[in-house]
Amino acid sequence: MRINARNTLTGTVRALTLGDIGAEVPLEVSPGVEPTATITRASAERLGLEVGRLASAAIQASDVMIAVGE
């Protein structure tokens, strides 16, 4: 796989929640760290996603904001 996104995380699919149209896919990239992607059900099926499968998440954002409470 080749991709231009610089923010790529590799991990293990921990769950797969399939809806009529969408799917939620939490990816464990390190112990206790599980970013969750919301993708179409068709994409989840086309990728052959299943619990325990190794996958990568490519993150592309124009802005990342950080806030602290004071």
Image: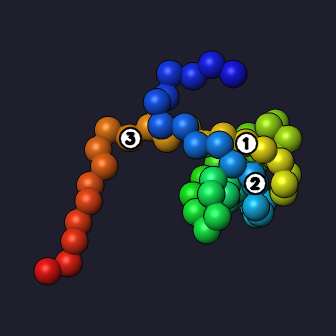
Residue identifier under label 1: 55
Residue under the image location 75 percent in, 54 percent down: 13
Left or right, residue 42 beside residue 4: right
Q: Amino acid at mark 1?
A: Ala
3D distance between C-alphas at marks 1 and 3: 20 Å
Check the image and report above or below for 39 versus 28: above
Q: Amino acid at mark 3?
A: Ala
How is the protein colored in the picture?
rainbow
3D distance between C-alphas at marks 2 and 1: 7 Å
Q: Earlier in the sequence, mark 1 or mark 3?
A: 1
On the rendered image, what quadrant is the N terminus found in?
top right
User: Which of the two discs, 2 and 3, sits closer to the camera?
Assistant: 2
Q: Position of residue 21 (x, y in %)?
A: 72, 53
Quadrant location of residue 30?
Answer: bottom right
The answer to whether residue 36 of the structure is visible from this angle is no
Q: Position of residue 37 (x, y in %)?
A: 60, 53
Circle 1 packing at 10 Å, graded few (<14), some (14-19), many (20+), is some
At numbered mark 2, what does the secondary structure look like: helix, strand or loop?
strand
Residue identifier under label 3: 61
Q: Nearer the viewer, residue 19 or 5?
A: 5
Residue identifier under label 2: 13
Residue under the image location 78 percent in, 44 percent down: 54
Check the image and report above or below for 18 versus 10: below
